[in-house]
Amino acid sequence: MAVSSNVIDLRSDTVTRPTPAMRAAMAAAEVGDDVYGEDPTVNRLETRAAEIFGREAAIFVPTGTMGNQIAIRLHTQHGQEVICEARSHILDWEMAMMSAFSGCLPRTIAGERGVLPWAQIRAAISPKIYYRAATGLISLENTHNMAGGTVTPLPIYEEIWQGAVEAGLPTHLDGARVFNAAVALGISVADLTRGFDTVNFCLSKGLGAPVGSILVASRASIDRARIYRKALGGGMRQAGILAAAGLIALEEGPLRLHEDHANARLLADAIATCEGADIDLPSVQTNIVFFTLKNGGDAPALVAALKSEGILCSAIGPHAVRLVTHSDVSREQCERCAATLVHLLKK
């Protein structure tokens, strides 16, 4: 069902529509068969992504789930464990594919606000004995979606990278919103991710492209990744039509993410004034806002009431609500949403 342009859609940053510049670039894109490596626009996008992240190579995939699952397959063997945070995307939202595709089980750790320090990770590494499933990979997430868009800072990663090397374990970053994390920290994505063996990031979330994610790594890893992309049905042929929008998203999208963060803070500060809601303000670090209704409040009912006011958002369980800011929602619209929330939460 189409969403009216008058609706304020805060369900996710995946709902953005291509800009006029993206549509023009898509219409004019030079294309070829990407399965043969002959699509010049896809090749440019992959080269540029690798440059931005300081890597040897990159591969364009249709979804973040595919990028993450390719990375897990690259690093692991059947029967191994993948260490990840207890609310991570690869665990909750990727259809058990680490088991179905890579034959691995998750070894989960609950991190404070989604952040896993090395001490917690080290304690979860399987001992090297033949009758225990071996640890195959450490997979982290930045920003952390279900923790409310929280950011893991660089010093924590530096300790993890050193520990992982000493333990002989590879590391992967689900960086679906890693540009949001880098903007929040005031550093480049290359610096923030430099110690990971593989990094996956989404073009179709905060950066605003209609479709696509990119996995960056060594050239040898990306050569193998093409095998697994094909196995998962990710050979997209004349994909330059999509890559053309991705190039614009990659170059221009990060420049305005601070606006989304400011709009999320506006919403969070308004919610914090309401006696009917609990919100952890320090966890609102980027473009995601989570809050919980007090006294067993009905989150789906609140979402329905907001929808009747022309505002879309998501219930996360029976008592929690998620709002996500993005390029298709203006400051003025967020102010309207904040006022509506205050009105409904004080009833």
Image (spheres, helix red, strand yellow):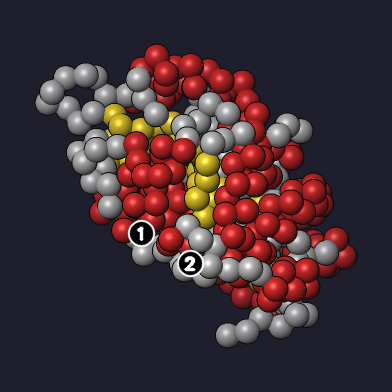
Residue at left offset 75%, top offset 80%: 5
In the picture of the structure, the residue carrying the numbered disc 1 is 230
How busy is the neighbourhood of tag 1: few (under 14 within 10 Å), some, or many (20 plus)?
A: few
Quick check: 132 left or right of 23? left
Between 43 and 335, the one nearer to me in the picture = 43
Which residue appears at 52% of the width and 55% of the height? Answer: 60
Q: Position of residue 151 (x, y in %)?
A: 63, 37
Residue to which mark 2 is pinned: 33
- Hey, which residue is sitting farthest right in the picture? 332
Q: Helix or strand or loop: what does disc 2 sit on? A: loop
Classify mark 1: helix, strand or loop: helix
- Compared with residue 124, is residue 284 higher up or lower down, i.e. above or below? below
Relative to the observer, which residue lies in front, 334 or 131? 131
Q: Earlier in the sequence, mark 2 or mark 1?
A: 2
Please tell me whether residue 336 is drawn above or below residue 79 in the rendered image: below
Q: Where's residue 31, x and y in %? A: 58, 68
